[in-house]
Image (tube, rainbow, N blue to C red):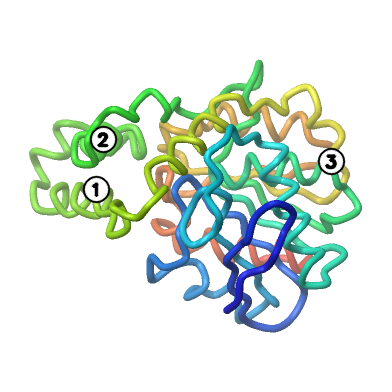
Amino acid sequence: MPFAKAGDIDIWYERVGSGPRLLFISGTGGDLRMRPNVLDGPFPKHFDMLAYDQRGLGQTSKPDAPYSMAQYAEDAVNLMTTIGWVSALVIGVSFGGMVAQELAINHPHMVEGLVLACTSPGGAGGASYPLHTLMEMNPEERARFMIPISDTRHDEDWAKANPETYEQLVAMAAADPYADEEGHEMGRRRQLEARALHDTWSRLGEIRCPTLVCGGKYDGIALPETQERMASRIRGAELRFFEGGHLFMLQDRAALPAMISFLKGEEET
């Protein structure tokens, strides 16, 4: 798949599947080279799906300057415009959900329907865990610190009772095959700095499209109570919780079919 010239950067994107247009906005550190990923799941069986590496990540440009959440949303707009999309359904996961909020607020005509997964509005509505405070940890330290936060069931007692599974989670969370690439660490830091300033709380009422807010029951990064507050602020929003933590989309088999049904306007069976 090609690069797209989008504003001041070149964005690496992939487009697969057929059906209604669906833009997928990924979370912190998202890199389409990491497989399997969302493109290998069920979404392309139902949608013409567009996913991309965000500013500072993966194969997309990594300018060494401050990034903002509004800027990330403009990157999505510029990418859609470049490939000829005037509007699309949108899924934003974690950090991507923050970007999707800005997109739906600032460009409401471009968002036909919205899924906000394991994300937060920031400000008085509640912020996701401050990942920028962990930047000085090495990958393994960060993984061990975040595992019981990402899924609150995975506490110290669980780790002792499930040592093999715990070490597999540590290895998976700490793995970064592209860590030595030029600009990689800087781009990651710039993303986390922008994330720390995210705040759409006072503007959530400006979202007009059908919206599903969803999260994991045991998510300590994007708290369940934060999902409830966010949904209450968005007119007509639906709220769903699934069995899992921050990775509930991988942990609960009901999650992706529920998102697909919502985006297609279908009643779940």
Q: Secondary structure at mark 2?
A: helix
- 255 left or right of 47 in image: left
Q: Secondary structure at mark 1?
A: helix
Q: Secondary structure at mark 3?
A: helix
- The dot on residue 142 is 2
- Where is residue 37 drawn, in percent x and y? 44, 67
Q: Quadrant of the N terminus?
A: bottom right
Badge 3 amino acid: Asn
Residue 240 showing in the rendered view = no
Give the camera-side residue of 254 and 194. 194
Kindly identify which residue carries mark 3.
106
First in sequence, mark 1 or 3: give its number. 3
- Where is residue 211 drawn, in percent x and y? 76, 48
Most distant residue in the top direction: 124
- Where is residue 131 drawn, in percent x and y? 41, 30
First in sequence, mark 3 or 2: give its number. 3
First in sequence, mark 1 or 2: give its number. 2
Give the class, few, some or many, for how many residues have Cα within 10 Å of label 2's Cα (few <14, many ≥20): some
